Image (tube, grey):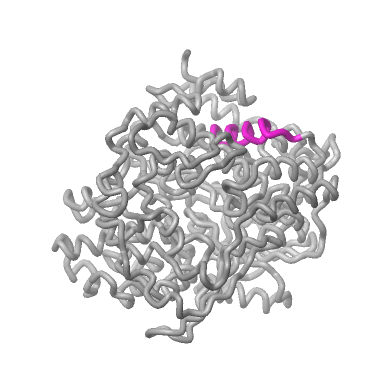
Amino acid sequence: MRQEKGFEAFLKQESIFPKRRSTPIPGGYMGKVLRVDLSSGKLTDLNLPEDRILRQYMGGQGLAQLIILHELPSGANPLDPENPLVVMAGPLTGNGKTPAGTVVTVTAFNNITRFLDGSVGAITSGIAAGYFGSQLKFAGYDGIIFNGVSEKPVYLWIKNGRAEIRDGSGVWGKDAYETQDIIRKETGEPGAEVMSIGPAGENMVPSALAATGPNHSCSHGAGAVFGSKKLKAIGVFGSRKVPVKNMEKLTEAGNQWRGKMKVYNYPQDRFGAGYPDVLKTIVHKNFQTSVFPEVTKELNQQEYTPRPCYECNRQCPYDVRITTGKHAGYKATVNGGSEQLEAFYTLGIGGPDVYYLADVINRAGIDGCHFGCGAGLAFEAYEKGLITKSQTDGLELKWGDVAVAEKLVHMTAKKEGWLGRLLAEGPKDLAEAIGPEAKKMVVHIKGGAPALHDWRPYTTQMLGQMTTTGGGKPRFQGFEIGPWPELGYTQRTLNQESKEGKARESFVGGLFRIASGCAGVCWFGESGVTVNHTVEALAAITGWDVTKDEVMAMGDRTWQMEHIFHIRHGWTPEEDMTNIGQRFLEPLPDGPFKGFGVAKWLPDLFLDFYKECGWDPKTGKPLKSTLQRLNLEEFDFLAASQ
């Protein structure tokens, strides 16, 4: 009762958006957030919060979570009109002088997570690089808040500070990429950036994503909230410049940053399987094996074109013109991360067919992590006779069948048939529908999915995966794959003999990754390379005396706010310790890490992590000292007794 009264009091606090700012707008910000009431059609420009708030949360996930905590009423469900959807850039987004200053975040209370008590929903943030975040700022805004629901399909169009809600009936039913092309034609701006959903978002599939142009997406359920509001897309275009307080220092920080960053060499760096080449493991046949020698067959015969993000030289995303096999001649767009590829590696599909399927699933608007964990379970269950053709609409689920995999993507997007509906709901729901044996085979995190790589050899990465909500991108990971000297880890830390220090390592790495997203920085252009240059760039662009400690505290504060939200919605330590698919905890069956698994260190590893977070190990609630340290005393009503 005390807890709920505390949250009700928090909701009644004065708006964080002042009618008139008492301090000048810092550099890095355009100065406005757009509120869009889809029920009434009203558009309102809001002033940015005061510097006191901006310095604590900056932007991205941090500021978006604060908005949602203030505006989401008690008892609201993820697909209700009252659920706000927040799109937010950061101060370094679009600055043009540093690499990786490209990020936009979509944050919402989504319907992926399944807690043990049957409640659905958690706050998650999908992060995308590319160009959309930069163009949002060039168009005059730091962020957008969507409230309510439209009576008919619409899209939002913003150009140089002028916003309008447009009829979306002409794009409703189109795939995510077709939608972007049509909106560019309708607006007469071929250089516009568009964030759009596909059929999965329209049908409110929990794992639906919002594509931010070919090669990029905000995953983890944002698309379902778009669809619930009848919001098909957001188009942005502008010519404004991001204000900079000290251009000389920003340029210097950016130049040093670029000089340290590892860049991809084309085409040879794309002849491999992607991130599995780094991990030395791969998701194959629903995690039954961690090796897949045939996965790279004919990849060195395809034609690759890098599609770098705004003013970034790393060149993570790319296009592929397929030159061999059934789909020869097809041009596929591929994201910088390889999760959308591993969604099909797990089904036994390799070679250039994977590029085709990655394009298909992006167009449908589905997060490959959730689809892959569900479809992998379905294929294994079919192989073992746990489901039959009567449950698959007549499809034979055989490993390596490209046509069947493509059909399942479309069934999932449309929630067609028994299997399509359950794949849409998520791997945990599918396992429960199949029966007890399937519960031993499923990979899930709180009903959703881990980022789809085989993390099992890496203790800190596994800890990060297991402590997420199953819908959000796991931020907590250490340095077992590579060092990060500026965070105090000068050597790779892979150690499968002991868990000592692993929780601390994961916590430190996670805080900076969270802070980076809030600042508008992509991890791919930063991890292991720079901390100091990021801090220097933030100080130069904003004019604030930013320090590394302040940035780390901002990451910590954002994490604590996310955790507070989840406590409000039913999280307890039991969720981390038991609401996880058994297969994910099994020792590796083969490969260079055969026999290793983190289950032997549970639940102690969780308790170590809670200690690092400043939480009570029994209840998981933040200690009063943690809230005071991070200036979160307004949540003292939630604090664990000490």
Going 41% across and 67% down the picture, which residue do you hit? 413
Judge from the rendering whether residue 626 lies leftward or rightward of residue 144; answer left or right: left
Quarter of the figure that contains the N terminus: top left
Q: Nearer the viewer, residue 413 or 293?
A: 293
Q: Position of residue 282 (x, y in %)?
A: 35, 58
Residue at (37, 32) in percent of width and height: 499
Q: Is residue 237 above or below residue 67?
A: below
Regarding residue 477, the answer to whether it shows in the image is no
| Residue 477: percent from left, percent from top | 47, 42
From the viewer's perspective, is 352 left or right of 30? left
Q: Position of residue 373 (x, y in %)?
A: 33, 57
| Towards the viewer: 327 or 267 | 267
Residue occupying the point 29% across, 52% down = 429
Would residue 220 be counted in the magenta stretch? no
Would you place residue 39 above or below residue 299 in this image? above
**Residue 234 visible in the displayed image:** yes
Task: State the extent of the magenta-drawn residues as a range.
Answer: 546-560
Q: Main secondary structure of the magenta part?
A: helix
Residue 220 placement, left or right of 283:
right
| Tally of numbered tags | 0
At 31% from the left and 64% from the top, the residue drawn is: 292
In the image, is residue 556 part of the stretch drawn in magenta?
yes
Furthest residue in direction front, as rendered: 491
Asked where in the image residue 71 lies, by quadrant, the reply is top right
Residue 612 higher or lower than 250, as above or below: above
x then y, percent, for residue 343: 38, 63
Q: Pick out the residue farthest to the left.
A: 385
